[in-house]
Image (cartoon, rainbow, N blue to C red):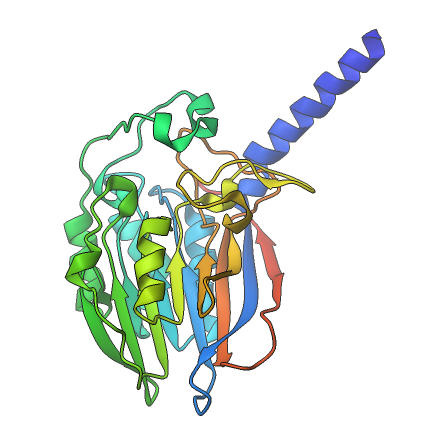
Amino acid sequence: MKRLVLGTAALGTAAIGYATGIERRHWTLRTAEVPVLLECARPIRLLHISDLHMLPGQASKQRWVAALDRLEPDLVVNTGDNLAHPRAVPAVLRALGPLLDRPGVFVFGSNDYYAPKPKNPARYLMPQGRKKRILGHRLPWRDLRAAFIEHGWHDLTHVRRRITVGDQLVFAAGVDDPHLRRDRYSDISGKADANAALRIGVTHSPEPRVLDPFAADGYDLVLAGHTHGGQLRIPGIGALVTNCALDRSRARGVSRWGSDMWLHVSAGLGTSPYAPVRFACPPEATLLTLVPRGSRVPRQRGALRRTHSDVR
């Protein structure tokens, strides 16, 4: 019995060490094909980045994200929570670096507006409705927004835009962070442009109350982050929580939402500095190859894994 207890304790210690010291820096590129374009459209390579939760000294994360430019995406979508520190704006801009010269759209999340605060880790596993929000001090999101816009990226917060990607029309709209209940879908309500090759919705938190009107208005694809893929996943079971009203089976990856719309939720590239743990859920960015409707069912896979040690 004593050996069993000691063995279990050793296994638990090893798992905690892996989750805090290795996996959270195991940067991963996932890829998937999604049939959402008009039949006559050419494929679009969409790079989805979310939840950087950047600290100034996270050099390996910055290098890895900057190297994603080699994928030559046609469009970059950033679904928020870029910051985790009041001096992290330059680090985010270094990370996104060459990607800022490509067509891009963005919305912000709660950790662009407010810094994270120390919390009881057990709160993460509590039902969403029982959590009281604890907001930190304000972060310089306006500086980050100004830099994104200066580079040509489009802020989709409560606006609808027509964007040319290559020579194809993309219709895009977004809402402010539903996790903070800042969303006002009524500001962008109405049918999406049926003549666009692609119609995308963008939100930080994938709350069903936001996903449903996007689907009703005819959007082909909605992109979101926030969930961290569950952050702690059990093999064979999946995510334990999503930190929102989305069901656990959709905590990361591509899924259907209704009969005509697809949803992609990014597991993101960071964690709160006060909960720096990932298990069975490595940090990720996703390259989505968007193809005409009627093509094969989406294939999802992980690829191009890279592990580095952060420079603090």
Which percent across, then down, holds residue 54? 36, 45
- The picture quadrant where one finds residue 124 is top left
Q: Which residue lies furthest to the bottom in this view?
A: 40
- Residue nearer the viewer, 193 or 34: 193
- The picture quadrant where one finds residue 278 is top right
Tell me: residue 179, above or below residue 306: above
Tell me: residue 271, above or below residue 163: above
Q: Can residue 162 be seen in this view?
A: yes
Q: Is residue 130 left or right of residue 266?
A: left
- Residue nearer the viewer, 14 or 221: 221
- Residue nearer the viewer, 106 or 93: 106
Which percent across, then down, holds residue 133? 28, 29
- The picture quadrant where one finds residue 41 is bottom left
Q: Residue furthest top?
A: 2
Quarter in which the C terminus is drawn: top left
Q: Is residue 112 left or right of residue 268?
A: left
Q: Can residue 309 be seen in this view?
A: no
Q: Is residue 1 left or right of residue 175?
A: right
Quarter in which the N terminus is drawn: top right
Count of picture labels? 0
Which percent across, then down, holds residue 122? 46, 22
Which percent across, then down, holds residue 163? 26, 79
Q: Is residue 39 left or right of residue 140?
A: right
Residue beneath the point at 77% across and 12% down = 5
